[in-house]
């Protein structure tokens, strides 16, 4: 009977030792692995969501890249309307060309000193230009269209005056006060345009 009692003690001790070993293994080996696996699953879900967002953004950028030529053409048009230097000789040639296309004579052109203007938070220069054009009413109207819509430079007409050259009025003289704009490059913003 004592042998049976000893066997039971050994069995009970073995079960307790196995339970203690399992508890120690759970606390020190298995549970940390479960926690780490849970953290890794959470990181994977976050990375998957970020990947989805980045793929969507990449698709948008690829579509925009397909339109790159259009954006570059728009930039070139904008740069011509707001050049980095005054380039008055080119502007005067554009005026003469607009006058010739409209069948009017452009003369009396004078350019004043540039002034600093702030437009949408950007400092640019405005060159006051006064000019007169003579011709028919239809020709002067076409000249104004050429000046504001066709020629590439940004021009703001600040005042206009029209007078008839003779009676009956078939020829008119149009006097314009305008501003021509220049956006100097950042390194030359303080310099006055001399062209």
Image (tube, grey):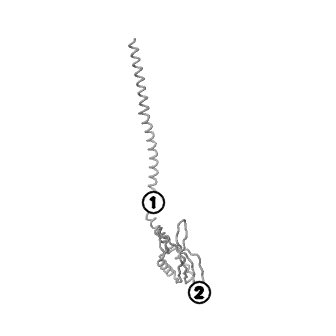
Q: Residue at x 41, y 24 (%)?
A: 17
Residue 92 in sight: yes
Q: Which mark is residue 165?
A: 2
Q: Is 29 rendered above or below residue 164?
A: above
Within 10 angstroms of label 1, few (less than 14), some, or many (20 or more) residues?
few
Q: Quadrant of residue 120?
A: bottom right
Looking at the image, which residue sits at the far right?
Answer: 167
x, y (%) of residue 101?
A: 49, 80
Q: Is 148 rendered above or below residue 3?
A: below
Q: Which mark is residue 56?
A: none
Q: Label 2 to label 1, Cα distance in Å? A: 55 Å
Q: Nearer the viewer, residue 83 or 165?
A: 83
Task: State the quadrant of the N terminus.
Answer: top left
Q: Secondary structure at mark 2?
A: loop
x, y (%) of residue 40?
A: 43, 41
Residue 145 in sight: no
x, y (%) of residue 115?
A: 54, 73
Within 10 angstroms of label 2, few (less than 14), some, or many (20 or more) residues?
few
Q: Residue at x 46, y 49 (%)?
A: 50
Residue bearing the label numbered 1: 64
């Amino acid at each position: 009977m004592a042998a049976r009692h000893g066997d039971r003690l050994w069995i009970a001790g073995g079960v307790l030792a196995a339970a203690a070993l399992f508890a120690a293994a759970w606390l020190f080996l298995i549970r940390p692995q479960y926690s780490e696996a849970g953290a890794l699953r959470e990181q994977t879900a976050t990375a998957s969501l970020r990947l989805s967002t980045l793929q969507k953004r990449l698709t948008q950028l690829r579509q925009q890249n397909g339109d790159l030529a259009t954006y570059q053409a728009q930039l070139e048009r904008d740069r011509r309307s707001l050049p980095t230097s005054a380039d008055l000789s080119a502007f005067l040639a554009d005026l003469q060309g607009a006058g010739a296309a409209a069948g009017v004579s452009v003369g009396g052109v004078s350019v004043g000193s540039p002034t600093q203007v702030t437009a949408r938070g950007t400092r640019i220069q405005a060159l006051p230009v006064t000019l007169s054009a003579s011709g028919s009413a239809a020709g002067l109207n076409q000249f104004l269209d050429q000046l504001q819509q066709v020629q590439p430079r940004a021009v703001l007409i600040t005042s206009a005056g029209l007078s008839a050259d003779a009676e009956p009025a078939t020829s008119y003289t149009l006097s314009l006060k305008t501003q021509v704009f220049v956006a100097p490059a950042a390194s030359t913003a303080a310099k006055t345009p001399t062209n």
